[in-house]
Amino acid sequence: MTILRLSHVEIRVPDLELATAYYSEVIGMIETGRDSSRVFLKCWDEHQHHSVVLTMEPTHGLNHFGFKVTDAEDLDLYQDRLEAAGVAVRRYAADEWAPGHGTSIRFALPSGHEMELVYGMQQVGNLLPQTNPPPRPMGLVGIAPPRVDHIFLTAEEVDTNTRFLTEHLDFRLTEQILGDDGYQIASWLEVSHRSHDIAFITGPNQGLHHFAYWVDGWNDLRNAADACVYHGVNIETNPTRHGATRGQCLYFFDPVGNRNEMFTGGYWVDPGADPITWTESEMGRAMFYFDGVVNQQFLTVHS
């Protein structure tokens, strides 16, 4: 019974064509399908049908996110576990929610976020041949990250969501920020043995702080910043590094208000290791190690 990694995010966009142009031309994702209200995209080194779904709605934000499981039987096991804990679970047959999507179960976190576990999403392949491939395709567009990496959500009670993921879904807590009163201000959790696959920070329930793409190194963050400036994209935070996760990052917004991150670095997690704790006085260093400051704009999100 194994949850492998972040599979996909579905975000709301009030202008579907504008958002599609941005994610295709600036981020450099590949469109794999669409219907009357949704566009499906993937990164160049992802094999599954989609990792980002753009859904036309009046506001921006997150509709749901999904994690990939190893085997079809994992869905039954997690569904039984969740329902035994009193959590309502909805099951989707393959292709029921969307073409190529696979079989899945969907449920709500205590914060109201819709989470999904999915198996058997259609495999469409990456942009490299299976025999004697080059390290990277030629002719990529925009920033062109190889894959999505993690999601960062807001919740009124971070500790409640953290316990839900660790107790019911076998996530492991890697880092946390604790207030002086012991209140859990933020948490980072993993299933893939990397520094984090999902994180929470105190804020409104059902809020999306950002979702992140992986890039291969610091120079890729610089190149991503160059691409943002060239395309007139608002950079919120120039290339820098986190204290928590030890990763390096760049933050900016899509044209309808969803925050994106390009992320690299971090560390490999020993499952037996104790979580790292940051104190409230060092929260600035945890978030942005060089500056040591978290401005109010960075903490402001919309549900």
Image (cartoon, rainbow, N blue to C red):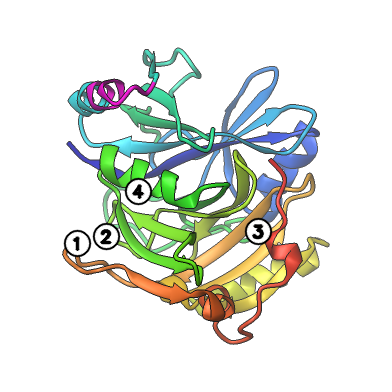
In this figure, which residue is indicated by the disc labeled 1?
271
Determine whether the residue tagged by mark 2 lies in a helix, strand or loop: loop
- As drawn, the label of residue 142 is 3
Determine whether the residue tagged by mark 3 lies in a helix, strand or loop: loop
- Label 1 vs label 4: CA separation? 34 Å
Report if the CB atoms under discs 4 and 2 are less than 8 Å apart.
no
- Label 2 vs label 1: CA separation? 7 Å
Asked if one can make out residue 102 in the rendered structure from this viewpoint, the answer is no
Q: Position of residue 147 (x, y in %)?
A: 46, 52
Residue type of the residue flagged with mark 1: Pro
In this figure, which residue is indicated by the disc labeled 2?
193
Mark 3 nearby-residue class (10 Å; few <14, some 14–19, many ≥20): many
Residue at x 29%, y 26% (from the top left corner): 85
In this figure, which residue is indicated by the disc labeled 4?
129
Q: Nearer the viewer, residue 232 or 244?
A: 244
Determine whether the residue tagged by mark 1 lies in a helix, strand or loop: loop
Q: Where are the magenta residues, as a range?
A: 79-87
Q: Where is residue 71 in the image (x, y as percent from the top left)?
A: 20, 30
Asked if one can make out residue 182 in the rendered structure from this viewpoint, the answer is yes
Left or right of 253, for residue 96: left
| Lower sequence index among marks 4 and 3 | 4
| Lower sequence index among marks 3 and 2 | 3
- Label 3 vs label 1: CA separation? 36 Å
Residue type of the residue flagged with mark 3: Gly
Q: Position of residue 141 (x, y in %)?
A: 63, 55
Report if the CB atoms under discs 4 and 3 are less than 8 Å apart.
no
| Lower sequence index among marks 1 and 4 | 4
| Lower sequence index among marks 2 and 1 | 2
Residue type of the residue flagged with mark 4: Pro
In the image, which is nearer the foreground, mark 3 or mark 1?
1
- Most frequent secondary structure within the magenta stretch: helix
